[in-house]
């Protein structure tokens, strides 16, 4: 099952840390949300550097995937009864280099089905209108069997 602790944090808090997910903890991710979206913040750390002076593409892809996961959880009608949410396809487009500063990300659910969810994620640094990476993600929802 998807982390109920993550769902509770997204349901009950306007901002906080995402320590309940190991990779989010490794990236030191924080979230901030309003009524329209959940935004993730990945603070710059020297461990995120790939090529000198640039954010590693794997860190950016992980940030985009976790932003997508957060959007799927928030889109669920009942945060107390969540399916297991698994990424099936993650396609990342790297648009420009990531500078050694904080990176932000947010995602939008473009199709919410009972078994498949399509999500579009965006990462930016200086200006949201100039993204550094984007992802299209397909998630599979595995609902528990009714007993």
Image (cartoon, rainbow, N blue to C red):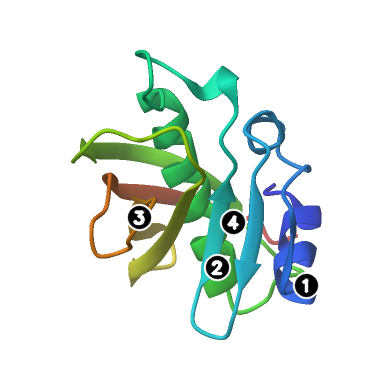
Asked if the residue under mark 1 is in contact with the one under mark 3, i.e. CB atoms within 8 Å, the reply is no
Taking 7 as reference, is 91 above or below it? above
Asked if the residue under mark 2 is in contact with the one under mark 1, i.e. CB atoms within 8 Å, the reply is no
Which numbered disc, 2 or 4, marks the residue closer to the eye?
2
The residue to which callout 1 is attached is: 13
In the drawing, does residue 77 fall left or right of residue 147?
left
> Front-most of 72 and 24?
24
- Mark 4, secondary structure of its residue: loop
Asked if the residue under mark 1 is in contact with the one under mark 4, i.e. CB atoms within 8 Å, the reply is no
Dot 3 or dot 1: first in sequence order is: 1
Q: CA distance from mark 4 to mark 1?
A: 25 Å
- Mark 2, secondary structure of its residue: strand
Dot 4 or dot 3: first in sequence order is: 3
> Front-most of 43 and 67?
43
Q: Residue at x 63, y 67 (%)?
A: 32
Dot 1 or dot 2: first in sequence order is: 1
Question: Which dot marks residue 121?
Answer: 3
Q: Residues within 10 Å of mark 1 (few under 14, many from 20)?
A: few
- Coordinates of residue 52 in the picture (x, y in percent): 37, 14
The quarter of the image holding the C terminus is bottom right
Dot 4 or dot 1: first in sequence order is: 1
- Coordinates of residue 30 in the picture (x, y in percent): 67, 52
The residue to which callout 2 is attached is: 38
In the drawing, does residue 59 fall left or right of residue 51?
right
Q: Residues within 10 Å of mark 2 (few under 14, many from 20)?
A: many
Q: CA distance from mark 1 to mark 2?
A: 11 Å
The residue to which callout 4 is attached is: 143
Q: CA distance from mark 3 to mark 1?
A: 21 Å
Dot 2 or dot 4: first in sequence order is: 2
């Amino acid at each position: 099952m998807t982390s109920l602790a993550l769902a509770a944090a997204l349901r009950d808090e306007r901002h906080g840390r995402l320590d309940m997910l190991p990779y989010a903890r490794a990236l030191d991710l924080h979230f901030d949300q309003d009524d329209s979206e959940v935004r993730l913040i990945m603070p710059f750390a020297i461990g995120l550097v790939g090529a000198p002076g640039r954010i590693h593409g794997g860190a950016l892809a992980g940030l985009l995937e976790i932003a997508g996961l957060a959007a799927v959880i928030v889109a669920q009608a009942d945060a107390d009864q969540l399916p297991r949410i698994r990424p099936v396809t993650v396609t990342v487009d790297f648009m420009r280099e990531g500078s050694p500063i904080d990176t932000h990300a947010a995602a939008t659910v473009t199709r919410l089905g009972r078994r498949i969810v399509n999500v579009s994620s965006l990462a930016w640094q200086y200006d949201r209108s100039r993204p550094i990476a984007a992802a299209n993600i397909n998630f599979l929802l595995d609902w528990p069997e009714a007993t």
